[in-house]
Image: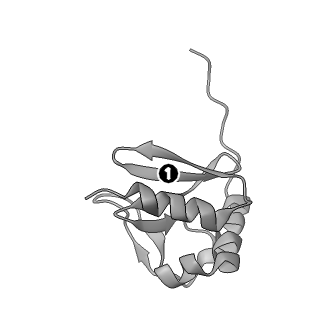
Amino acid sequence: MSTARATVEHLLEQLEPLPVRVRAMFGEYALYCDEKVVALVCDDTLFLKPAPASDGLPEAPPYPGAKPYRVVDRVAIEDVERLQALVRATADALPVPKPRRAR
């Protein structure tokens, strides 16, 4: 099963004005904040990368064989301030991505 585009658009609306974008990957989506992958959207569910800000959220793998991510439930997604704080804090806790080498 894949994620509906409407789910991704709703997430982007909830996260405005944060500097976020999504990228389609294998039928699902990666969510970027400050050019860091902070979450995956799989099967219409938001999975945040583990970070201190999301301690206490339930964990589950976003797809078979993946490491556990933190699952953000629908109630938290509808709480705009909480969702934005979780995404911002996760981005702040992650290292800056290494620059890609030119081909």
| Residue 40 makes an appearance in the image | no
Report the side of 77 relative to 17 (left or right): left
- Comparing 32 with 56, the one in front is 32
Q: Percent x, y for residue 6?
A: 44, 60
Which residue sits at x=64%, y=49%? 36
Horizontal side of residue 35 vs 25, given as left or right: right
Q: Is residue 99 above or below residue 88?
A: above
* Image quadrant where one finds the N terminus: bottom left
Using the rendered image of the protein, determine whether residue 89 is visible from the camera's viewpoint. Answer: yes
Residue 18, position as x, y percentages in the image? 72, 59
Give me the residue at 65% from left, 64% from top.
15
Task: Please identify the quarter of the rendering in which residue 88 is found.
Answer: bottom right
Q: Position of residue 98 (x, y in %)?
A: 66, 37
Q: Amino acid at mark 1?
A: Ala
Image height of 46 relative to 38, above or below: below
| Residue at 45% in and 81% down | 58
In this view, which residue lies farthest toward the top?
Answer: 103
Q: Residues within 10 Å of mark 1 (few under 14, many from 20)?
A: many
Q: Is residue 98 left or right of residue 8?
A: right
Assign the C terminus to one quadrant of the image: top right
* 100 on left or right of 65: right
Using the rendered view, name the quadrant where residue 25 is placed: top left
- Kind of element beneath mark 1: strand
Front one among 32 and 53: 32
Which residue is at a point 70% across and 78% down the rendered structure image?
Answer: 81
Would you name the residue on which mark 1 appears?
Answer: 30
